[in-house]
Image: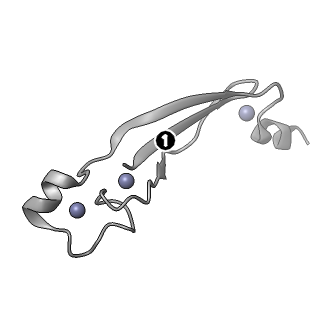
Amino acid sequence: MCRRRHVRTVYNHGFTHPEEEVNCYGTNCIFSPNHPKDCTGERCKTKCWQYHTYPQQYVVNKDHDCPQCAAARR
Ligand SMILES: [Zn+2]
Ligand SMILES: [Zn+2]
Ligand SMILES: [Zn+2]
């Protein structure tokens, strides 16, 4: 099923990116482009994912300054 991903990059300071959507491309998920158009109603409700899973959060640590700080210094 599809999920939202929240990435936080930590350079010299933390930097939070906007949430991005990660598509599963499954046939049993209503957010997927591969979900059959004729899959609707009760059948869809019982067999398909109707919601996104809880946003996944992860932190990426970098050992250099953030691109904006680096650009501002130039
Ligand atoms: Zn999905
Ligand atoms: Zn469905
Ligand atoms: Zn910065």
Mark 1 packing: few (<14 Cα in 10 Å), some, or many (20+)?
Answer: some
Q: Is residue 62 left or right of residue 29?
A: right
Residue 35 x %, y %: 32, 66
Q: Quadrant of the C terminus?
A: top right
Which structural element holds mark 1?
strand
The amino acid beneath tag 1 is: Arg
- As displayed, is residue 23 above or below residue 66? below
Q: Number of marks in the image?
A: 1
Nearer-the-camera pick, 47 or 53: 47
At a point 46% along the width and 34% down the height, the residue shown is 56
Residue 47 x %, y %: 19, 54
Residue bearing the label numbered 1: 5
Residue 54 x %, y %: 35, 35
- As displayed, is residue 69 above or below residue 31? above
Specify the quadrant of the image occupied by residue 10: top right
- The quadrant where ligand 2 appears is bottom left
At a point 57% along the width and 36% down the height, the residue shown is 7
Nearer-the-camera pick, 8 or 4: 4
Question: As drawn, which residue projects farthest toward the right?
Answer: 74
At a point 84% along the width and 38% down the height, the residue shown is 70
At a point 50% along the width and 31% down the height, the residue shown is 57
Specify the quadrant of the image occupied by residue 30: bottom left
Residue 60 x %, y %: 67, 29
User: Ligand 1 near label 1 (Cβ, under 8 Å)?
Assistant: no
- As displayed, is residue 66 above or below residue 43? above
Which scheme is used to colour this image of the protein?
one colour
Q: Is residue 45 left or right of residue 11?
A: left
Q: Is residue 36 left or right of residue 73?
A: left
Nearer-the-camera pick, 50 or 61: 50
Question: As drawn, which residue projects farthest toward the left?
Answer: 42
